[in-house]
Every structure is written in C-alpha cells, then in structure tokens.
Amino acid sequence: MLHALICTDKPNHLHVRKANRDAHLARVKADERIVQAGPLLDATGEMCGSLIVFDTDSRAHVEAFVAADPYATAGLFAEVRIVTWNRVLSR
C-alpha cells in the first residue's frame, strides 16, 4: 500500500527549509520504505513543500516519520497531509 506525505511550507520560510535540508535528506535516504521524494515548487521554481511516497501498510510509520523529520521539528510546515493512494498505473 502506498501513502503520500504532502507538506506545505509556511510562507517566507525558505530559509528554514534550506537550513534543515541536509538533515532532512539524510532521514529520507535512510528510510527504506520511501520510494519517491522531492520538493514541491511554487510558480517561480522555489521550494515550497514536500511530497514523499511510502510503500508501507503502516500509516503509523508515516506519522512517526513526519513527527521526527527535521523540517517538522524546525516548524517549517503550515500543513501536513497523509493520503493513502491506490496506484492503478505504473510505467
């Protein structure tokens, strides 16, 4: 089962994202249940959020991941959503 973690940054918090990016990426790379990840971009191409796709049956795993993520603990996110996703097509 797939879960998408969709996080939206607080306005004017790009400096918080950049300051915590290395620690966040290390955490993402260490989690073997993550199958896709990357920043969301605004109309100008600046990072403004995160999209991480987990291959796990455990929503609790995703909740624990985001609770301890350096971006979250630094107060970067205005909104955090976890969505269960049923992939129909994969190429």
Image (tube, rainbow, N blue to C red):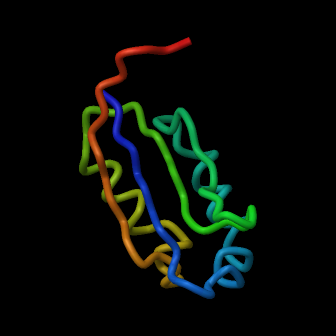
- Picture quadrant of residue 84: top left
Q: Is residue 41 left or right of residue 49?
A: right
Residue in view at x 65 percent, y 75 percent: 17
Which corner quadrant holds the N terminus?
top left
How many tags in the picture? 0
Residue in view at x 40 percent, y 52 percent: 5
- Picture quadrant of residue 57: top left
Residue 55 versus residue 78: which sits nearer the camera?
Answer: 78
Residue 84 versus residue 12: which sits nearer the camera?
Answer: 12
The residue furthest bottom is 12
Q: Is residue 74 above or below residue 53?
A: below
- Image position, residue 23 (x, y; %): 67, 66
- Image position, residue 10 (x, y; %): 51, 82
Residue in view at x 36 percent, y 66 percent: 80
Q: Is residue 26 left or right of residue 55?
A: right
- Image position, residue 43 (x, y; %): 67, 64
- Picture quadrant of residue 19: bottom right
Q: Is residue 9 left or right of residue 43?
A: left
Residue in view at x 25 percent, y 46 percent: 59
Q: Is residue 41 above or below residue 73?
A: above
- Image position, residue 75 (x, y; %): 48, 84
